[in-house]
Image: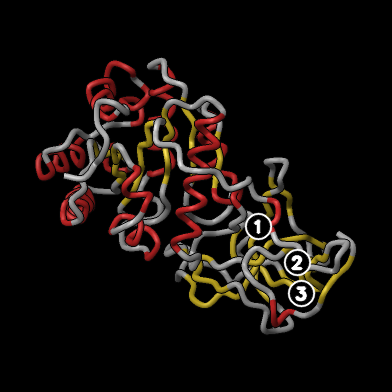
């Protein structure tokens, strides 16, 4: 950083911005690059990243600076303007934008300038996608548990969070289970909401190829939010990401969501090899889901177990199956 620009009208997603915390609200802590949270105080100076956000359980927000104060829209350090909030959310933490960070050439600093180099797609590594019915349906636990189980089965595994809002929870969950992780922030996106699909696809290709170059035989990819979120729907409907998947694990909060999710996938000529997520925590709900979907319901412990997952994942490995489309 060499200076600051106050030309906020040209600010865009990914730009780095120096802010003063004006008033504490919903997010009272900020996640740091050191993988810890920092307690915030009014008057603190913080460098954040401008970004859009789509989170049905929290905020809908835009990467816009159009007032004297803006909002902390995500604990991962994303700032913007909150447009809609869940009824259970407090008012957002308010921020005074002081300036966009500029480099030695006077150009605004954007995380896209520090992304991994674009890489050609890798078609050899097995890619398993984890989708869900909604936010907080259990996708992250399902994805990290599957990665852990695959590692215990003898595979070299990596975890990827391909869409969502920048935060270290999903990233850490993969690494806690022993799988090295990458996410969309590594390819220069603070969030993927409102990003053009070609950029999300390009980022996905780079993340998969990078994981493969680092030794992964299998990559478990978590896709954020639910199947009706606009980027997730576009991925499933028609995208290079869809075409690259060798299998889908679907996370659902209950039996109805499990059936609905599988129905939506089937209408797109896709299908899950199993259901997991919150529904698997209840034996009764799991029994209902199994009855209406005809699919195995795998708990976290099931996903950890090589013996349990072997019959489900073995047919998905590259060479055994090349597509998830029916």
Q: Where is residue 142 in the image (x, y as percent from the top left)?
A: 38, 37
Q: Residue furthest front?
A: 120
Mark 1 = which residue? Answer: 112
- Judged from the image, the secondary structure of the residue bearing numbered disc 1 is helix
Q: In this view, does 116 lie to the left or right of 96?
A: left
Mark 2 = which residue? Answer: 17
- Judged from the image, the secondary structure of the residue bearing numbered disc 3 is strand
Give the quadrant of residue 287: top left
Mark 3 = which residue? Answer: 96
Say if 250 sits above or below 59 in the image. above
Which residue is at 41% across, 49% downward? 223
Q: What whole-number distance in Å separates the C-alpha atoms at marks 2 and 1?
A: 14 Å
Residue sitting nearer the eye, 64 or 43: 64
Q: In this view, does 250 lie to the left or right of 195?
A: left
Residue sitting nearer the eye, 243 or 190: 243
Quarter of the image with the N terminus is bottom right
Which residue is at 58% across, 53% downward? 166
Tell me if mark 3 has few (under 14), some (14-19) or many (20+) residues whose alpha carbon lies within 10 angstroms of its own.
Answer: some
Mark 2 or mark 1, earlier in chain: 2
Say if 130 sits above or below 299 in the image. below
Closest to the camera, between mark 2 and mark 3, is 2
Q: Is residue 263 left or right of residue 78?
A: left
Q: What whole-number distance in Å separates the C-alpha atoms at marks 3 and 1?
A: 24 Å
Which residue is at 69% across, 79% downward? 10
Quarter of the image with the C terminus is top left
């Amino acid at each position: 950083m060499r200076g600051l620009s106050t030309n906020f009208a040209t600010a865009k997603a990914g730009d780095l911005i120096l802010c003063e915390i004006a008033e504490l609200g919903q997010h009272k802590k900020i996640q740091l690059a050191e993988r810890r949270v920092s307690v915030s105080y009014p008057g603190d100076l913080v460098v954040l990243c401008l970004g859009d956000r789509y989170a049905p359980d929290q905020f809908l927000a835009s990467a816009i600076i159009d007032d004297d104060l803006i909002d902390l829209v995500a604990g991962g350090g994303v700032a913007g303007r909150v447009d809609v909030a869940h009824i259970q959310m407090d008012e957002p933490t308010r921020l005074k934008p002081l300036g966009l960070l500029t480099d030695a050439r006077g150009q605004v600093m954007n995380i896209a300038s520090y992304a991994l180099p674009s890489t050609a797609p890798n078609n050899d590594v097995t890619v398993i996608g984890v989708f869900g019915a909604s936010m907080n349906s259990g996708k992250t636990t399902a994805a990290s548990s599957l990665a852990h189980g695959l590692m215990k089965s003898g595979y070299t595994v990596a975890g990827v969070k391909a869409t969502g809002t920048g935060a270290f929870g999903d990233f850490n969950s993969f690494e806690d289970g022993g799988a090295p992780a990458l996410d969309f922030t590594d390819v220069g996106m603070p969030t993927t909401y409102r990003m053009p699909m070609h950029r999300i696809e390009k980022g996905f290709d780079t993340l998969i190829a990078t994981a493969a170059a680092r030794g992964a035989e299998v990559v478990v990819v978590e896709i954020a939010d639910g199947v009706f979120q606009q980027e997730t729907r576009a991925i499933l409907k028609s995208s290079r990401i869809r075409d690259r998947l060798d299998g889908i694990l679907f996370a659902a909060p209950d039996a109805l969501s499990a059936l609905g999710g599988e129905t939506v996938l089937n209408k797109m000529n896709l299908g899950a090899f199993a259901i997991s997520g919150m529904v698997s925590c209840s034996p009764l709900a799991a029994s209902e889901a199994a009855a209406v979907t005809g699919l195995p319901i795998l708990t976290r412990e099931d996903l950890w177990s090589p013996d349990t997952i072997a019959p489900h994942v073995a047919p998905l490995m590259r060479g055994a199956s090349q597509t998830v489309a029916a």
